[in-house]
């Protein structure tokens, strides 16, 4: 859990700096930084997808995961969590004078996002970017098995800089993504001993490839804003991929 706690600390630190000083950054610079993160996420997602040993497994996992995600309305649930957190946060701010923090969360002039949508977008984007990826899974397993949090330390540095850029543009919702990091990443660490006995290298390869596709979706939808995609509804694909590999192995299919 040390790696997860470190990750939470860097996200909070980076996000807070983004809120405090992000308004001083020119809007053009902030947009360029987000675009740069989007391009990197796009390239990193493609890099991870290329690790697949069977693209059909990735495709099947995505389709099954999408059906489950739409059935369970995962993205809608994440948005509702974000709206609930925002209402709690705003209700506390409403009891006293308007703070500098609330002013920093106001959208920039000409922004096409309302405050509520900004909060949800920041929470959802940061949660997915920080929790979807092979480093999260591999790092959490290593941390849980033998206390080696080196991978999560690297991820923490990257997430801290990303949180600074996200918070300066998307607002305070980015900070609340640490809740998802705690439960998702910390949960994997706590279950690492059990997972290590089940997950094979082939399963990890396909899970990594699926994560890469989800990162591509995040880049296209939330960061580069090319096309809206309900990426959250694809999250079950991460669990489906290793199950498909195990099923094919049981049938003797390579």
Image: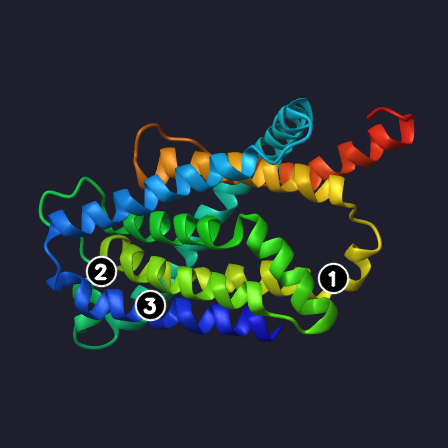
Residue pictured at 27% horizontal, 47% vertical = 34
- The image shows residue 199 at horizontal and vertical percentages of 78, 48
Q: Which mark is residue 223?
A: none
Image quarter of residue 91: bottom left
Residue hosting label 2: 105
For label 3, the SS is: helix
Q: Secondary structure at mark 1?
A: helix
Res. 192 mark: 1
**Quadrant in the picture for the C terminus:** top right
**Residue mark closest to the camera, 3 vs 2:** 3
Report the residue at 74% width, 62% height from top. 191
Mark 3 crowdedness (10 Å alpha carbons): few <14, some 14-19, many ≥20: many
Q: Is residue 183 above or below residue 135?
A: below
**Above-or-below relation of 113 to 193:** above
Instruction: Report which quarter residue 142 is drawn in.
Output: bottom right
Rendering coords of residue 127 (x, y %): 46, 53
Secondary structure state at the residue bearing disc 2: loop
Distance, label 2 to label 1, CA atoms, is 37 Å
Label 1, label 3: how many angstroms apart (C-alpha)? 28 Å
Closest to the observer, 229 or 202 = 202
Return the disc, 3 or 2, that comes first in the chain's sequence.
3
Q: In the depicted view, which residue is nearer to us: 229 or 143?
A: 143
Residue drawn at the location 42% of the way across and 57% of the way down:
84
Q: Which residue is mark 3?
A: 14
Q: Mark 3 and mark 2: span between their CA atoms?
A: 15 Å
Q: Which mark sits nearer the N-terminus, 2 or 1?
A: 2
Q: Nearer the viewer, residue 207 or 226?
A: 207
Q: Find residue 36 and report its horizontal and vertical position in percent.
A: 28, 45
């Amino acid at each position: 859990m040390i790696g997860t706690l470190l990750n939470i600390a860097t996200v909070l630190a980076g996000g807070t700096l983004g809120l405090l000083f992000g308004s001083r950054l020119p809007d053009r610079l902030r947009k360029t930084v987000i675009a740069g993160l989007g391009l990197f996420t796009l390239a990193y997602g493609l890099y991870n997808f290329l690790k697949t040993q069977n693209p059909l497994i990735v495709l099947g996992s995505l389709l099954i995961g999408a059906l489950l995600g739409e059935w369970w309305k995962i993205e809608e649930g994440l948005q509702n969590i974000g709206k609930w957190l925002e209402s709690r946060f705003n209700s506390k701010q409403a009891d006293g004078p308007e703070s500098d923090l609330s002013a920093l969360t106001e959208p920039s002039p000409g922004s096409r996002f309302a405050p509520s949508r900004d909060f949800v977008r920041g929470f959802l984007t940061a949660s997915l970017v920080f929790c979807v990826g092979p480093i999260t899974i591999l790092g959490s397993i290593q941390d849980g098995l033998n206390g080696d949090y080196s991978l999560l330390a690297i991820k923490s540095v990257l997430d801290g800089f990303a949180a600074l850029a996200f918070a300066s543009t998307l607002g305070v919702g980015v900070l609340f993504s640490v809740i998802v990091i705690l439960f998702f990443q910390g949960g994997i660490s706590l279950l690492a001993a059990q997972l290590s006995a089940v997950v094979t290298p082939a399963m990890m390869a396909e899970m990594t490839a699926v994560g890469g596709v989800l990162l591509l979706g995040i880049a296209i939808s939330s960061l580069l804003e090319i096309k809206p995609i309900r990426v959250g509804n694809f999250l079950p694909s991460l669990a489906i991929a290793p199950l498909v590999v195990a099923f094919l192995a049981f049938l003797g299919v390579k």
